[in-house]
Image: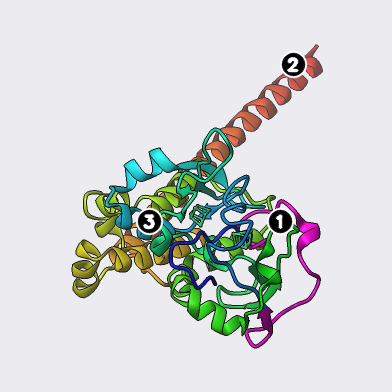
């Protein structure tokens, strides 16, 4: 959005993915498209400069985390410890992280000169004051969602009084949102799909931990892929293996495929045929054992019943003789 490269790009809460906007009444009730016009400009000269970088909830996507920590030259673990707080993603049982605000409720990256991490600021900050939401039909496959935009107009934000007019499409290009969305796409689809299930169907604790690791710490996820039984279970071709070993973006995309396959049973990552065969044989063996046990129980009950019948007969005969 802004034409200043030093300036902070505050919060936009995508209501569907990133938690409730703290001021839902400031969301204008008009559904916007990429061609809708936006009258807005944010720059260091506005009287409210950086006012919006506090008391906010900025959920980080896997790409946000990767881009921010690379920009700061930090390993994932250190970045997460220093700058984030664990949260559940809105209306899901999926664990994620948000930016940890300082004791004054301000973003740790804001100074009076603006955002100190502006080139690698999170997606949410790029969007503001535009929000994007998905409409995702319950039960539909991953790509069955419709996007639309809305405008957040908060009284403290004076950017709306500026004269610049552009389309949402131009705004998106200016803010680097297209790239962020492209990178976040698969992960967003997983979150939206999970959200469409509602809270009735809860994930197991190991599944939650796996989602958290794959979504926040690619260093650990890489270790998991290469140093566990993962590659004995899943079919991963040589080319993919080579790329995910070195390339964090490739690994991030791969982690979404893995999450989608393990959480929703999609076919994006295939389990090796021999593993499926082994599992089928194990189930068969277990079923065979169950049938055997059922037969044994039946035989035992039959013997007991015969013995009982025999003793009743004996008793009757004895009584007749009397
Ligand atoms: S990351 Fe930058 S733009 Fe976003 S809230 Fe923090 S200081 Fe503001
Ligand atoms: S409140 Fe609006 S105009 Fe002011 S700094 Fe934040 S985004 Fe820019």
Please name which of the two marks, 2 or 1, marks the residue nearer to the observer.
Answer: 1
The residue that disc 1 covers is 156
Residue situated in front as seen by the camera: 136 or 102? 102
* Mark 2 neighbour density, 10 Å: few (under 14) some (14–19) many (20 or more): few
The quarter of the image that holds ligand 2 is bottom right
Q: Is residue 33 magenta?
A: yes
- Write the residue at 77% across / 61% down: 26
Left or right, 275 with respect to 237, comes to right
The residue that disc 3 covers is 68
- Write the residue at 31% across / 52% down: 72
Mark 2 residue element = helix
User: Which residues are drawn in magenta?
Assistant: 13-38
321 relative to 216, above or below: above
- Write the residue at 48% across / 64% down: 187
Q: Give the x, y percent position of residue 154.
A: 73, 59
The residue that disc 2 covers is 318
> Total marks drawn?
3
* Mark 1 neighbour density, 10 Å: few (under 14) some (14–19) many (20 or more): few
Q: Point out the tag, 3 or 1, that comes first from the N-terminus.
A: 3
Q: Is residue 154 magenta?
A: no
Mark 3 residue element = helix
Task: Look at the image and tell me whether residue 65 can be seen.
Answer: yes
Q: Point out the tag, 2 or 1, that comes first from the N-terminus.
A: 1
């Amino acid at each position: 959005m802004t034409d200043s490269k030093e300036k902070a790009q505050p919060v936009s809460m995508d209501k569907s993915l990133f938690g409730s906007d703290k001021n839902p009444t400031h969301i204008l009730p008009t559904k916007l498209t990429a061609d809708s016009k936006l009258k807005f400009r944010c720059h260091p000269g506005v009287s409210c400069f950086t006012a919006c970088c506090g008391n906010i909830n900025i959920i980080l996507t896997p790409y946000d985390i990767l881009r921010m920590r690379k920009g700061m030259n930090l390993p994932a673990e250190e970045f997460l410890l220093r700058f984030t707080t664990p949260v559940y993603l809105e209306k899901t049982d999926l664990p994620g992280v948000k930016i940890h605000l300082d004791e004054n409720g301000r973003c740790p990256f804001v100074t009076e000169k603006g955002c100190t991490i502006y080139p690698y600021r999170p997606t949410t900050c790029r969007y503001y004051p535009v929000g994007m939401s998905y409409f995702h039909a319950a039960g539909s496959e991953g790509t069955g969602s419709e996007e639309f935009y809305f405008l957040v107009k908060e009284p403290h934000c004076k950017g709306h009084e500026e004269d610049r007019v552009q389309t949402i499409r131009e705004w998106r290009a200016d803010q680097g949102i297209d790239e962020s969305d492209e990178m976040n796409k698969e992960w967003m689809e997983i979150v939206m799909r999970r959200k469409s299930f509602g809270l009735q169907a809860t994930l197991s604790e190991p599944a939650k931990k796996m989602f958290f690791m794959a979504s926040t710490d690619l260093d650990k996820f890489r270790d998991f892929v290469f140093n566990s039984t993962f590659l004995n279970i899943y079919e991963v071709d040589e080319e993919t293996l080579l790329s995910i070993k070195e390339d964090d973006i490739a690994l991030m995309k791969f982690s979404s495929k893995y999450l989608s396959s393990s959480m929703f049973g999609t076919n994006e990552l295939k389990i090796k045929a021999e593993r499926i065969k082994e599992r089928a044989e194990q189930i068969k063996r277990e079923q065979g054992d169950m049938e055997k046990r059922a037969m044994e129980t039946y035989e035992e009950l039959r013997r007991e019943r015969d013995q009982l019948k025999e003793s009743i007969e004996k008793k009757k005969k004895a009584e007749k003789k009397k």
